[in-house]
Amino acid sequence: MNEAGIAHHSASVIWRYAKVLVLVSVGVLLTVGPFCLAITTERHHTSVGLGIGLSLGLGIGLRLGSRSGVSIGIGAGSLVGIIAALIEGFAPFNGIGIIIPPIIGIAIGFVDGIGTERLRGFREAIVVSLVMGAVLGAGLWLRYGWQGFAGALVMSLFVGTMAGMRSDSDGGMFRRFRRPPILVIVPCAGLFALVTWAIAAEGHGWASPFVALISLIVLPGAGFAIMRAVAAWLRPRLTIYRQLTGYLNVMWVPIGAFALGYAAIILVWAGFFGALHQTYPAESFTGIDPAIPPSMNDWLFFSFFNATAQDYNQLQPASNLARLLVGSQLIVNVGWAVVVFAAVMSLVQPQMKKLAETQANGQDAE
């Protein structure tokens, strides 16, 4: 490959990853941000939800890099980000020990369950879990600093160990239990003792081992098992969206043209309504405050509601000419919706039939 080919390939890779970065970020922000702001006024709750959602979504999206990676990244980031915000906002007490354990288990369980292949063996399970822990730890850094990052890594090691205990890909979590190797047991035991000591130093006394057991094993293990089962249940039901992608690509241009025409009708009749009011201000429409004359925004809203056959409470036609103008828009809208939409469907029907045959042949080949 010559220098021009290498430069073109590099630019293509950069553009692909940049597109994934932008799409996943926008999708997660639009989903998690308004939800977090709706349930709480505390900024740190929102920062936790957005930080975890963005880091997880971007990690998955950039790792997969395809269109499915974008959709899965947005879905996983939004779901886990919302769950994190709920835990942070409604848990009886906040802190690293209450939010990180279930979130780590939920995130890794989602990745394991939604994929076409399960995590196999201790090495793969622990490596993937540690990567996910580092990604989620980056999202927790804004709220908990380095302690959040370190806590996420510690939890992910235990979740990866529990994930590696499964010897079958589709069975229960601990069906046909496999003992972890010594290279896994030793660091887990050491970290368990260290966490127990840290909890005891905070004054928990004899309950410290039980608190460590709940934080390191019970909560993340439960989150992993539950979310893995949920994601595995969702996986075959989400494949329908991949099949719909081809149909949406076929319909995108004609449906977009239909929508633009509909918007043009709304805009044109908004101008008609405004011009009629300017010509006959006293008798055309009711509901107008003489001190505050209607603006173009008002006529656009009135035209939009009229196009959807809905009443716009603020403005009502009063004169016969205004009623005639309103009725003419309704007739044009109905004609556009029925005739033009039927023409659009006739245009795309051969392409959709060809696409259906292609998908059917591909399934038969498999």
Image (cartoon, helix red, strand yellow):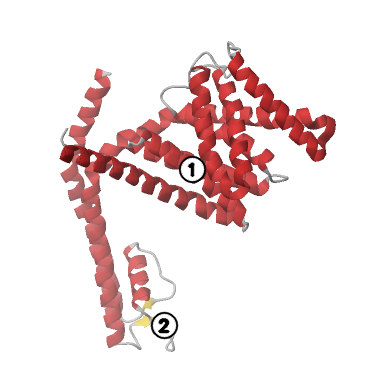
Q: Indicate which disc residue 248 carries.
A: none
Seen from the viewer's position, the closer of residues 323 and 281 is 281
Tag 1 or tag 2, which sits nearer the N-term? 1
Residue 103: image quadrant is: top right
Determine whether, in the image, residue 141 is placed left or right of residue 198. Answer: left
The percent position of residue 22, horizontal first and vertical second, equals 37, 49
Circle 1: element type: helix
Question: Residue 114 at x, y = what percent?
Answer: 45, 29
What residue does disc 1 label?
55
* Image location (x, y in percent) of residue 200: 79, 34
Local crowd size for mark 1, using a 10 Å CA cut-off: few (<14), some (14–19), many (≥20): many
For the residue pair 240 and 30, the one nearer the viewer reads as 30
- What residue is at 60 percent from the left and 56 percent from the top? 43
Q: Kindly identify the amino acid type of the residue bearing the numbered disc 2.
A: Ile
Q: Which quadrant of the rendered structure holds the C terminus?
A: top left
Point out the image quarter for the N terminus: top left
Mark carried by residue 288: 2
**Position in image of residue 268 (x %, y %):** 24, 71
Q: Residue at x 45, y 52 (%)?
A: 30
